Image (spheres, rainbow, N blue to C red):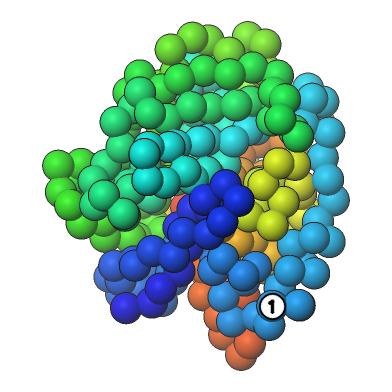
Amino acid sequence: MVRVAAMLILGATAILPVEAGPAKAGDFSIAANPICGKGQSVSKGCDAIRGRAIVDAFDPRWSAIGRLNYSNSRIRMHCTGTLIARDIVLTAAHCLFDKVSRRWLNAGQVHFLAGYQRGEAVAKATAVSYEVDKMHDTGSKTYVHDPRHDWALVRLDRPIGDMAGTIAPFPPGSTGAGLAPPSTAVIVGYPGVRPHVQSMAENCRIDWKYRTSGMIEHDCPVMGGDSGGPVLAEYNGGYRIIAINSSATTSDGRLTTAATLLEGRFPAE
């Protein structure tokens, strides 16, 4: 069992056990460790995260991206999410499982802050329900991680996308016959060493070799807190979401991130 951080406690780090996933998915552990990158040295890993550019979260291009927060009497933690509709946030499924209490979260304890930056946000809302991949049993006390199915749709109590905007998934089939799959992408999120600012890494190299199984890999620096954050590619003069950050592994000392591919899962608009 690998001990990694699925999500970051605000001000501290939650070190939580992760169940191995099947086959190729089992090579990955939930989104890098609390010290800036599983398999990297502390200094190099943290430098890579801190080297990401800080984004103006209030800019309409980025304000649909925000922080997904959860807290109870014992723990506070966060992930990254993106408004893909007026009242729907896309994030990672593992962000909705509390490994301390060993249960799926109550929706009302989950809050989304769109365009969050240094204590302020463009808009805020509370979850009323959520949907995860059918492979997950939300009545179970065990979370089995698989980056091919690590997505969740969180429905909010009000349509804050009217204020913060939305970012749609790539149109179905657009990475197929119509357009060549993008070779690079942008990631945006709230990593644990910078939990109160939105930051991005550009020119992430994408590896599509696991596309048919529902995931891609990229080489940009991520850590706990980035989970659920969008992997973006340019489309028609703007950005669309091609995947969401899920988990990480190392090979030859290099960190590789697995991202859950959205192709064919959700409508483009």
Residue 258 in sight from this viewpoint: no
In the displayed image of the protein, which residue is found farthest to the bottom? 252
Left or right relative to 28: residue 133: left
Picture coordinates of residue 154, whole percent (x, y): 41, 28
The one nearer the camera, 160 or 119, is 119
The one nearer the camera, 28 or 49, is 49
- Eyeballing the image, is 187 above or below 129? below
Picture coordinates of residue 130, whole percent (x, y): 34, 29
The one nearer the camera, 192 or 55, is 192
Determine the residue positioned at 20% across, 41% down. Answer: 138
Determine the residue positioned at 71% across, 30% down. Answer: 119
Determine the residue positioned at 58% across, 18% down. Answer: 124
The residue type indicated by label 1 comes to Val
Picture coordinates of residue 203, whole percent (x, y): 79, 58
- Eyeballing the image, is 18 above or below 69? below
**Figure quadrant of the C terminus:** top right
**Figure quadrant of the N terminus:** bottom left
Determine the residue positioned at 23% across, 46% down. Answer: 103
- Eyeballing the image, is 222 above or below 72? below
In the displayed image of the protein, which residue is found farthest to the left? 139
Picture coordinates of residue 193, whole percent (x, y): 69, 57
Q: Answer few, some or many: residues within 10 Å of disc 1's Cα (few below 14, many 20 plus, some between 14 and 19).
A: some
Q: Quadrant of residue 229?
A: top right
How many numbered marks have been drawn onto this rendered protein structure? Answer: 1
Left or right relative to 12: residue 136: left
Residue 68 in sight from this viewpoint: yes
- Eyeballing the image, is 266 above or below 86? below
Residue underneath mark 1: 42
Instruction: Indicate the secondary structure of the residue bearing disc 1.
Output: helix
